[in-house]
Amino acid sequence: MTEMKNPTEEPVVEPTAEETVETTVEAAETPAPATEETPAPVAEEPATEETSATDEPQAETTTSIATYETKAQVVERLKALASGDEEVTRQELDSLKSQFYRIHHQEADVAYKKFIEDGGNAEEYTPAPNLEEADFKEQMAILREKRAAVAAALEQEREANYQRKLDIINKIKAFTENPDEINRTYNDFKELQQLWNDIKEVPAEKATELWKTYQQAVEAFYDTLKLNNELRAYDFKKNLERKTALCEAAEKLAEETDVVVAFRKLQQLHQEFREIGPVANDLREQIWNRFKEASTVINKRHQEHFETRKQQEEENLAKKTAICETIEAFNLDELKTFADWNALSDKITALQAEWKTIGFAPQKMNTKIFERFRAACDNFFTRKSEYFQTVRNTLNQNYAQKLELVEKAEALKDSTDWKATTDILVDLQKKWKEIGTVPKKYSDQIWERFNAACDAFFAAKKEANKGANSEQAENMEKKKGIIEALAAIVPEEFEGDLRAKLREAQEAWNNIGHVPFKEKDKLYKLLREQMDRLYGFANENATKRRLDRFKENVKNGNIGGDLRSRLTRQLDILKNEIKTYENNLGFLNLSNKSKQGNALVEELNRKMDKLRADMEEVKAKLAAIEESK
């Protein structure tokens, strides 16, 4: 079973106190706390037995929340929210927090399983740090501040709305103070009503009294207004149609399967209901009772929903308390071996997995029970880490001692002082056996190094004693003779075909057998130096002769009309070839550190030198053509 991380480093995702809201809904028959969403009694509606759609604190609007596959994507989403103007909802922050730690747990499980599958020892596994967590927490803090600023701004806006609505009430009252002019103020009155409806929320504690005052002013205006019966009847008819539609919508909400969604929609319906003007006096109580009855059904379902949730949260608290008591009861002082710690670790990991399947506890206890659970897990994993660290320190000390023996053996592997070095290596082997085990991931590697160093010395010693190097020594002398013969050649004084001489020397070299391995590269380097010296001279002379002949032909007019174009194309080809070789050479210098790679680099350099010489020859020919014009 994969061991779960210490909750201190990777917390089991739990809501904070502000993230879980326990809501109690009053019975439909009980007057609800007055808010802007609760229609207060007006003249056309009974002033008793009000039904509120806002017994529960307003929740944020439900939006579609994306699912992410990496922690980096979660952090990027947080950064986008922190830097942009998009609304930051609590639901999305909760989701992003949950996704972040869920992804981290999944990555940790995959890393652990891969470590085990690759042959790692569970006792030596060290979880990778959660590199994105600091950035994640920083962005979450920014967003919390941002939400707080938005809330403060909203509260200021509500207060400003309150003052604007007070001003509207005063203006309506002013209309009723001059009855003779009230007919001419009807349009102004309707505009004020529309303005009232356009103004949104006000402070909740002032909403009910403000609404009552507004309705009293409206009723006073209508009582004073000398509208003709036709206009007043038309107004009442349109208001009745709109309120009837809202009643039907409220009744339809009884079919909504999501209780919380239905409750939120009902709040909006109440907002719209109270914004509609009065209906005929004989229909006011009837239409209000119909809307109130539909509201009562939704409120009751909402109340039952939260009562059920409260009962479930109490059961969850009991289950989580039992898990805490189980972990706290383990006697860690009795654990003496890796097996003991790992066995208990499996049990605690299983309890952590069970904890994740349990829902929230009551709000007032949710944080406390999680802190108790985390403290119990922290204690276990801290004690386990201390035990493993003690063992790990011992293994590392052994590794350091054996590494020192390896370095001494490797420093002696090429020694030819057979007797003294043999004694030293035998003593190192004896000390090696006395040192304890090392971490498993280094065990094979360090032993192979130590063994290889010892084997190299004793193999060389054995070979030396057998005198098997006599033939290679003879071959070495032959190759030295070839090098000395080439070194004696003065190219300016050499008579005959120098290139043929060099080819003969190369062939003779190739026909000679092996030389001592440690002398091989040094001899080849000396041969190459002489070959490069003599070939360079031969190539230079050949180039000079070709240029002399070319200039003579140019002078005598023995060249084709398109020769300059062909030479220009040849020059471009040579430049491209040199560039290709330079790119390859750069790649080899970065990726090859072996002797074979060094030899290839030398070969590329020689080819590039040849191409550069050819390029200079072409340039000289082009210059000769230009001079002849």
Image (cartoon, helix red, strand yellow):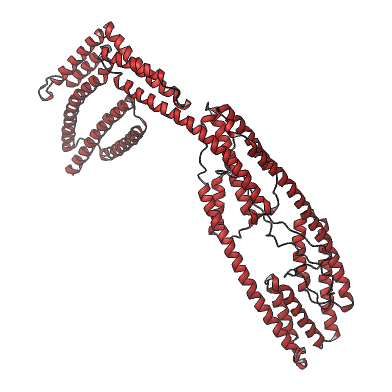
Q: Who is closer to the viewer here, 37 or 584? A: 37
Left-right relation of 298 to 135: right
Going 71% across and 82% down the picture, which residue do you hit?
169
Magenta segment: does it hold 428? no
Q: Position of residue 403 (x, y in %)?
A: 37, 25
The total of numbered circles placed on residues is 0
Side (left or right) of 623 relative to 299: left
Work out which quarter of the rendered image holds the C terminus and state it: top left
Q: Residue furthest bottom?
A: 180
Examine the rendering and report whether any part of residue 19 can be seen: yes
Residue 277 included in the magenta stretch of the image: yes
Q: Position of residue 628 (x, y in %)?
A: 17, 42
**Taken as a whole, is the magenta stretch helix, strand or loop?**
loop
Q: Is residue 75 left or right of residue 63?
A: left
Please say if 323 is above or below 226: above
* Depth order, front residue of 37/392: 392
Residue at x-position 47% and y-position 27%? 441
Query: Above or below — where is 378 with respect to 145?
Result: above
Q: For the view shown, which residue lies furthest in the top direction?
A: 466
Locate residue 98, reporting x and y percent.
Answer: 62, 47
Query: Residue at the left extreme?
Result: 493
Left or right: 242, with 156 as reference point = right
Residue 1, visible in the rendered structure: no
Q: Nearer the viewer, residue 170 or 349?
A: 349
Q: Quadrant of residue 211?
A: bottom right
* Residue 332, placed above or below residue 194: above
Span highlighted in magenta in the image: 275-279
Residue 566 screen position, x and y as percent: 29, 37
- Depth order, front residue of 361/131: 361
Query: The N terminus lies in which quarter of the figure?
Result: top right
